Amino acid sequence: MGMEKLLNQWLWPQEFWLPPTITWHDIDEGTTGGSRQPLPRDLLVVFPLALAFIAVRFAFERVVALPLSRKLGVFDRVQVRVQPNPELEAFYLKKKKQFTQHELVCLEKQCGVRLREIQNWLRLRHNQDKPSNTKKFCEASWRFTFYLIAFTAGLTFLINTSWFWDHRECWRGYPKQPVAESHYWYYILELSFYWSLLLCASVDVKRKDFKEQIIHHIATISLISFSYCANFIRVGTVVMLLHDSSDFLLESAKMFNYAGWKKTCDSLFIVFSVVFLGTRLFVFPSRVLYSTFMESLEFFKPFPGYYLFNGLLLVLQALHVFWAYLILRMVYKFIFLGKVEKDERSDDESDVEEEGEGSSMEEECCWEQTRETLNSKLVSLANNCVLNNLTHQRRNMNSRLPKAR
């Protein structure tokens, strides 16, 4: 009991997490009578659940997603394996793609391999690390399955609640608001899933918005954890439902994109764009943010946790604007080019970029050879010019000698 009291004083001071004149005891009294009581220690269950999600995910990808990818016709490009070379392998692992032309020249002298062969080896070695379409399809299918189930369950749990239609009900009677068992598990499973995504971020396919995704996962985990501890569960369930409503559409579009079903992918992408822009740029700021910033002050005075909660929501909104920019770029390509050429949030290296990289390497190599050949020809030409001048002068002198005699 002494340790628990000490942790409550340092980690969960009521002056920070709760409005003035409200204590943790008030929340305990308000959630009696068969309803669940939101306590910070309840969040400890998310860590074993996150590990369970990871185990279920790997089983799902092998048992369900992999056979499904074959039925849908997901095609993997055959990658050419490079010849083993310890020195080039060590250089590649150290530098990846962050190397200069000078470093390649030094590596050429060190290994005794031509510059063009080194560049081709590095390009092929980089291609070996690119994830296959099957791997990307399996990851997208797992996220699609969870987001679809979460959205369906969340909509079922919330559609009959008062705060789903009137956001002022999110704050009425706060913090003495009972928590239903279904809302508790909706919260815990969503939090566990985002923890599993964060733990697997290093082994998943890295995309162009990798850093933004990490920030999104951290902000989401912080929001869900804080809102549960402070009993902001009502508005928290609305935020999670808004996010799930477009996420499963995006993942389904990715699945059909990897399978080569372009028309289906384009149609799903248009539907996703409409839902995303409507929920993230209109509903979220005009309804949720307005309610948390303005309507909530009708029921309690601002406190430190209030500013933290709204600050995290603003971080999410900033990410929404960033992703909306990428989506609008894709919509522009779809309208003017007739199709979605590539996912703006796709892998770090697309096929087009890879081909451009290879051609640039070959151009640099050809330029090096051409420059060396040109230098040698200029030297030989200069030498020939000097020899021709000397020979011409010698002939003139020989022709003048008889006349002088």
Image (spheres, grey):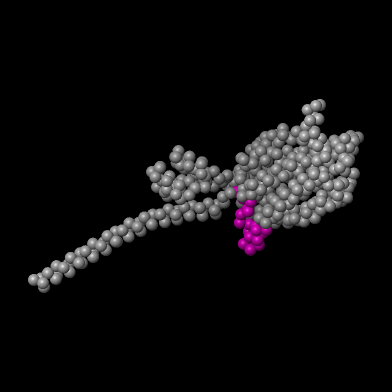
Q: Tell me the quarter of the picture where residue 63 sits.
A: top right
Q: Considering depth in this image, is 10 or 63 the residue closer to the camera? A: 10
User: Is residue 232 shown to the viewer in this render?
Assistant: yes
Q: Position of residue 206 (x, y in %)?
A: 61, 45
Q: Is residue 341 magenta?
A: yes
Judge from the rendering whether residue 399 lies leftward or rightward of residue 386; answer left or right: left
Name which residue lies at 64% across and 41% down: 201
Above or below: residue 210 compared with residue 329: above
For residue 184, say whether it is visible: no
Q: Nearer the viewer, residue 101 or 51?
A: 101
Q: In terms of depth relative to the viewer, which is nearer, 182 or 133?
A: 182
Residue drawn at (51%, 44%) of the image: 95
Quadrant of the frame with the C terminus: bottom left
Viewport quadrant of the N terminus: top right
* Residue positioned 63% across, 51% down in the render: 345
Residue 319 x, y percent position in the rendering: 70, 51
- Closer to us: 321 or 402: 402
Residue 233 pos. (x, y %): 82, 42
Q: Using the rendered view, name the quadrant where residue 15 is placed.
A: top right
- 224 in magenta: no
Q: Which residues are magenta?
A: 328-347
Q: Residue at x 25, y 62 (%)?
A: 386
